[in-house]
Image (tube, grey):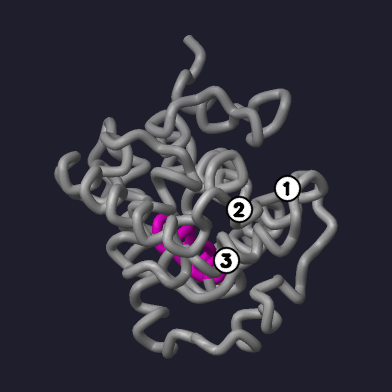
Amino acid sequence: MRDVAQEKTSYTPPDGWARCALTDQEIVALVTGGNEAAFEGIMRRYNRLLFRLARSIVPNDQDAEDAVQESYVRAYFNLGQFKGPGGFASWLSRITINEALSRARRKSRISALDDCGLDADGIATDARLQPDRVAMSDDILGLIESAVDTLPQDFRLVFMLRAVEELSVQETADILDLKPATVKTRFHRARGLMRKTLTRRLGSVVPRSFYFAGERCNRIVEMTFRRIAGRDDEAQ
């Protein structure tokens, strides 16, 4: 009889982990069974969500990337603490929120326009020519992102998940450990604050803000595996 557990441990989807169809629980089982590469399936699946979640807490993209990488490293070495079978996204999100909050407390929030990478008109000075941005004005995109940054943190977390990541009320409630009614209230208030700044500039542009492209996704995966390898070497 073939060793089914061993087969699962060595299995890699033919199209790569970016399009992995396995469930979170199945991937976790592969990783804990010895297939380190399977963790890429988790990272590819949750990179954008965790980046946007962290970015709603820390003041810039680099800090958000660093928070996500550290969260993955912590999750990898603590997979045994995840009980399952459901709720993996919430478990991973809470690790990221805690890491981002810790970083935000250690680093004072930047408020000056120059430090935010915006000019006097609120236009991003470090704008990049990216596929999803070709059809939109950089000044509007910069205004949206800076307006989100000005929201109170509790509102910002909900707005990032509901409007930018486009999660449902229940999904947002699960991730933030809130009641659905609280999510609705905070989202309503966040939108009201945003309208004062953006008026009619919300809508289809919002889900495309805080751009998350393949390059950033690949970088997070690569750096996380480097850190995991480093931890493994230290343990030997």
| Position in image of residue 80 (x %, y %) | 31, 49
In depth, the one of 178 and 82 nearer the eye is: 178
Q: Earlier in the sequence, mark 2 or mark 3?
A: 3
Label number found at residue 105: none
| Badge 3 amino acid | Glu
Q: Residue at x 75, y 45 (%)?
A: 132
Q: Residue at x 38, y 70 (%)?
A: 99
| Badge 1 amino acid | Gly
Q: Which residue is mark 2?
A: 209
Q: Which residue is mark 3?
A: 65
Q: Earlier in the sequence, mark 1 or mark 3?
A: 3
Q: Residue at x 27, y 31 (%)?
A: 85
| Position in image of residue 56 (x %, y %) | 44, 63
Q: Secondary structure at mark 3?
A: helix
Q: Provide the residue span drawn in magenta.
A: 64-75
Local packing at callout 1 (Cα closer than 10 Å; few below 14, some 14-19, many 20+) is few
In the rendered image, the residue lying farthest to the top is 1
Q: Secondary structure at mark 2?
A: loop
CA gap between label 2 and label 3 equals 16 Å
Residue 224 picture quarter: bottom right
User: Can residue 47 be seen by looking at this rendering?
Assistant: no
* Left or right relative to 51: residue 114: right
Local packing at callout 3 (Cα closer than 10 Å; few below 14, some 14-19, many 20+) is many
CA gap between label 1 and label 2 equals 15 Å
| Position in image of residue 126 (x %, y %) | 76, 73
* For discs 1 and 2, the disc positioned in front in the rendered view: 2
User: Can residue 215 be seen by looking at this rendering?
Assistant: yes
Q: Which residue is mark 1?
A: 214
| Badge 2 amino acid | Ser
Q: Main secondary structure of the magenta part?
A: helix
* Left or right relative to 179: residue 134: right
